[in-house]
Image (cartoon, rainbow, N blue to C red):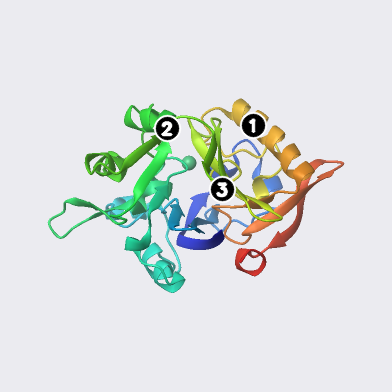
């Protein structure tokens, strides 16, 4: 199995949204905000070569939305799913599976484009697209808190094309790839674990979006069930420190990957890693 990070886009988010109840005076020691209190975010997807399968985990937000939408996203830099895919040496048509950790717009928007006639079309037309049945239900009947993150144009064309697979339960997805479900951020979010020869690599999605979110109370304000998220996080981090997992962050602009250790203050990051250097 080979794992490649792939940046879909870089953008900015309000620091208060990113760090919830933690005061800026504290979180700014970890992440420097700009003059508007915005912090840099990346959308780091994973491309995984697994025998004859090529699996893309999340797709970024895509580029089919309105000017107004992108006006709130504060995109910067030149990274795009298209350009970084080209650099990877694979083509969109090579992708056999797309796994959505969840259906918030910044995780799945890149899978569906609009053609010249303004009709939706799948970017990964040979791929089966997977998400949990819990998240599918949740996204199709959104609550008022998350309704601004669930756009049916991002996922309904996939179902209409017959390319959707709903995952019902946790456990093995493919040999060496296990899925955990987490419910604190949104219902039925997938956190994938990749079992390599001598390492377990975990793609953190929005469960622990950046290295700055490792301290247990540092929860994003967008988590729908903060107390559930807190409990899931505490339990997972203890396991990760005990078993020596490597955590890959989807949204950390600076840090791709860390391992974690137990300290007197709780579980904390130990060393940082670049994925391409230590994985493949
Ligand atoms: Zn999310």
Which residue was labeled with disc 1? 232
Which residue is rendered at x = 73% and y = 38% of the image? 239
Residue 63: where, in percent of width, then height?
31, 57
Which residue was labeled with disc 2? 135
Circle 2/circle 3 CB separation < 8 Å: no
Which residue is rendered at x = 68% and y = 37% of the image? 236
Depth-wise, is mark 2 or mark 3 nearer the camera?
2
Residue 211: where, in percent of width, then height?
66, 51
Q: Residue 197, labelled with which disc?
A: none
Residue 201: where, in percent of width, then height?
64, 51
Which residue is rendered at x = 51% and y = 30% of the image? 224
Task: Give the quarter of the figure containing the N terminus.
Answer: bottom right
Label 1, residues with CA under 10 Å away: few <14, some 14-19, many ≥20: some
Q: Earlier in the sequence, mark 2 or mark 3?
A: 3
Depth-wise, is mark 3 or mark 1 nearer the camera?
1
Label 3 secondary element = helix
The CA distance from mark 2 to mark 3 is 26 Å
Q: Earlier in the sequence, mark 1 or mark 2?
A: 2
């Amino acid at each position: 199995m080979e794992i490649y990070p792939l940046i879909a886009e870089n953008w900015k988010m309000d620091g208060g949204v990113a760090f919830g109840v933690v005061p800026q005076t504290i979180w700014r020691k970890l992440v420097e905000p700009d003059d508007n209190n915005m912090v840099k975010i990346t959308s780091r997807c994973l491309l995984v070569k697994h025998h004859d399968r090529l699996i893309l985990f999340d797709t970024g937000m895509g580029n089919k939305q309105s000017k107004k939408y992108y006006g709130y996203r504060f995109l910067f830099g030149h990274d795009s799913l298209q350009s970084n895919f080209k650099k990877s040496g694979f083509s969109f048509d090579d992708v056999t599976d797309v796994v959505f950790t969840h259906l918030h717009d910044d995780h799945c928007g890149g899978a569906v484009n609009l053609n010249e006639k303004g009709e939706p079309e799948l970017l990964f037309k040979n791929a089966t697209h997977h998400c949990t049945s819990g998240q599918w239900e949740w996204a199709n009947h959104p609550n008022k808190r998350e309704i601004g993150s669930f756009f049916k144009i991002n996922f309904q064309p996939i179902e209409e094309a017959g390319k959707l697979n709903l995952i019902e339960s946790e456990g093995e997805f493919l040999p060496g790839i296990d899925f955990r479900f987490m419910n604190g951020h949104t219902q039925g979010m997938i956190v994938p674990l990749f079992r390599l020869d001598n390492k377990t690599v975990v793609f953190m999605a929005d469960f622990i979006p950046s290295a700055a979110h490792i301290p247990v109370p540092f929860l994003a304000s967008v988590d729908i069930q903060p107390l559930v998220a807190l409990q899931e996080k505490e339990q997972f981090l203890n396991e990760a420190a005990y078993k020596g997992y490597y955590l890959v962050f989807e949204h950390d602009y600076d840090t791709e990957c860390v391992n974690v250790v137990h300290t007197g203050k709780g579980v904390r990051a130990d060393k940082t890693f670049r994925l391409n250097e230590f994985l493949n």
